[in-house]
Amino acid sequence: MPTRGELVALGLSASCAEVLGHLWDYLDDEIDGAGAARMRAHIGGCAECRAYAGAERCFLQGLAALKRELRAPRLLRERVARRLQREGCGCWERARRKDAG
């Protein structure tokens, strides 16, 4: 994920950078009510972030469908969970569980 400064240098506002920095947590319902409301408001009013969020949502839905179809071995789930945790993703614990979906 690019840094906030890199996103701003690409012409995105600081608000866009904030949204993109927390998008996966938002899509995974890992953000509290007030934060989620701010994310929804920004995405609703920003065509670039709305398009990006739609693409990420589609990706996550496709990944979830594959995950239901192909069960990952325990060691792979553990490796993915550790990496997600290191990257600061709030969904890392769910990745570790066998029944996560």
Image (cartoon, rainbow, N blue to C red):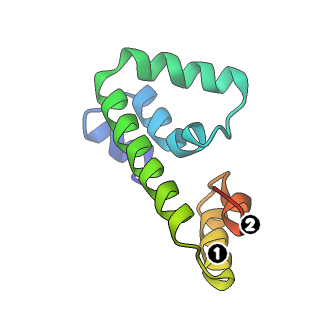
The foreground one among 76 and 21 is 76
In contact (CB < 8 Å): disc 1 and disc 2 = yes
For label 1, the crowd category at 10 Å Cα-Cα, with few meaning under 14, some 14 to 19 and many 20 or more, is: many
Q: Residue at x 74, y 66 (%)?
A: 97
The disc label shown at residue 61, or none = none
Image label count: 2
Instruction: From this view, report whether residue 78 is shown above or below residue 46.
Output: below
Residue shown at 64% from the left, 75% from the top: 77
Mark 2 is on which residue type? Arg
Q: Which mark is residue 77?
A: 1
Report whether 22 appears left or right of 85: left
Residue 35 in picture, x, y percent from top left: 65, 26
Q: Tell me the CA gap for discs 1 and 2.
A: 8 Å
On the image, numbered disc 2 is attached to which residue? 97
Local SS, label 1? helix
**Is 3 situated above or below 36?**
below
Left or right: 6, with 93 as reference point: left
Residue 6 placement, left or right of 57: left
Whole-percent x, y for residue 75 in the image: 66, 85
